[in-house]
Image: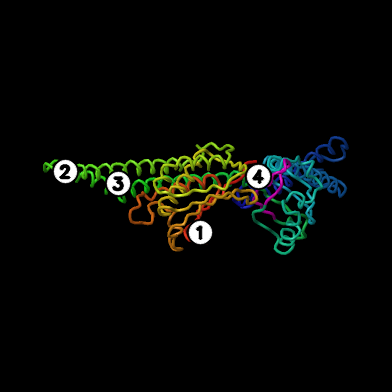
Amino acid sequence: MADVSATPFAGSRPRRSALFAAAGVLGVWVVDAFVDSVLLGDRTFAEHLLSPTPAEVWLRLLVAALAVLLYRSRAAARQLRLLSSALATSPDGIQITNLHGIVTYSNEAVREIYGFSPAELQGKHVNEMNADPTFATRVILPALAKEGRWVGELEVKHKGGHVFPIWLTTSVVLDHRGKPLGAIGVIRDLSDRMRTEQELRDYAHRLEDATELKDLFADILRHDLLGPAATVQLSLDSLLRRDAEPVAARRIMEGARRSCAKLIEMIEGAATYAKLSTPQQIDFGTLELGSVLKETVADVELRRQERNACITLAATGEYPVRANPMIADVFENLVSNALKYGGPNGTIRIDVRDEDDRWRVSIADRGEGIADADKQKLFTRFERLRKEGVKGTGLGLAIAKRIVDLHGGSIWVEDNPGGGSVFCVTLPRAA
C-alpha cells in the first residue's frame, strides 16, 4: 500500500491550512475595519485598517482563530467519517480490541465471517471466538505486548457451530506519545482457499488415477497380451504352412484356444480394474456376509470337486456389512486361489470373526505357504508368484485389494500355523 503521507495531496494539507489561516486573518481584519468605520464614524476606513487599537487587534485575531479552528474541526470530522466508512465497508474483517483482548469494534465483514453481528461481539473476549479458548491469552496477547504485532493462521468458531481457519494480522495501536491504546486485527477467511486447495488435490489424484490407468494398459500390452497373441499367431501359421495330422492339429488348436482364453481373461480383468478407479460410481448397501460366503462356496463347487478338496465354512450367525455386491468377487478370488495353491485333496477353512466395528473373514489353506518377502507383492498387479502348472494373470489379487480398499476395509496374508496361508479381509459393519 502506498504511503498516503507522501502524496502531493497529503503534503499540501499543512500549506492549505496556513493559507486559509492567513486568508481568514486578512478577511476578518478588513471586514472589522470597515464595520468599525461605519458604526463608530470616529476614524476613516484606512485608519481602522492600518492603525487599529489594541482591543481591535485582539478581537480580529480571536475571530480569525475561531474561524480556522472551525475549518480544521470540520476537516477532521470529514476525515473521521471517511475512516469510519472505510473500516465499515472493508472486504476483510476489521476488529479493534483493548489491550486485554476485549472487542470494542467489529465491521460488517466480521459478521459475514463469524456469523455474529457487531453488537453480539461487543464486549466479548477474543478467546471466546477461537477454537482453542486459551490461544489468544497464551500466544497473541503476549506477542502484542512484546513485539507489537502477531501474524498467523488459527481456527475460530462460527455462530453455526463449525470450526474454520482464518488468517489474522494484528498490531498494537499507539497514541501520539507512543503509548499503547489497543489492538487492531485484519481477518481473512481461509475457507475458500482451503476448498480450492482440496479441489486441486482431488484433481491431482484424478490425474494420478488417469496416469495409473494408462500405465495399466501399457503394462498389459507389454507384459502379457503380446505373449498369448504371438502364440495364437504361431499356431495358426503352423496350420497354414503344412498339413498337420489330426492329433497334431488338435494339439496346436488347443494351445491357440488356451491363449485366446488367457487374452479374454486378462482384458476382462483389466476392464474391471479400470472401472474400480471411479469409486463415486459404486453404490453401497447392507449385505449379509454369511450369505455371500455360502454363495461363494456353492459357485466353486465344480472346481472343488476337480481338486478333490474340502471346504469348511464356519459362519453360523448374521454378519451385516456395508458393501456393494462386487465384494463377492473378492471371496470368489480368494477361495479359487486356495483351491489352486492348496494342492489336490487339500482342506480350506473359512471363518468369520467379530472385531469391534468390523467383521474379519479368514480363508486358510494347507498349501506350500508364501515367503514373507512375497506377501506384499501378491496385491500388486502382474506380481503373481509363478508356480508350475498354475494359470493366472496377476490381476486377481490386485482387483481384490482395490475392491476392499473402496469398501474401507483391509486385506492381507499371513502364515497358517499348521502350514499354508491365511488370507484375511476386514469390512465395516453395517449400522
User: Quarter of the image holding residue 36?
Assistant: top right
Q: In the image, which residues are magenta? A: 155-170
Q: Is residue 215 left or right of residue 176?
A: left
Q: Amino acid at mark 2?
A: Asp
Q: Nearer the viewer, mark 4 or mark 3?
A: 3
Q: Is residue 156 magenta?
A: yes
Quarter of the image where the C terminus is located: top right
Mark number, residue 352: none
Q: Earlier in the sequence, mark 1 or mark 3?
A: 3
Q: Spatial distance from mark 1 to mark 3, Cα to Cα?
A: 31 Å
Q: Earlier in the sequence, mark 1 or mark 2?
A: 2
State the mark number for residue 237.
2
**Relative to 141, residue 18 above or below:** above
Which amino acid lies under the numbered mark 4 shown in the image of this protein? Asp
Residue under label 4, please give it.
Answer: 92
Report if the CB atoms under discs 1 and 2 are less than 8 Å apart.
no
Q: Answer whether residue 17 is magenta in the image.
A: no
Please, what is the dominant secondary structure of the magenta stretch?
Answer: strand
The label nearer to you, 2 versus 3, is 2
Q: CA distance from mark 4 to mark 1?
A: 57 Å
Which residue matches tag 3?
Answer: 225
Residue highlighted by disc 1: 414
For residue 250, which quarter of the picture?
top left
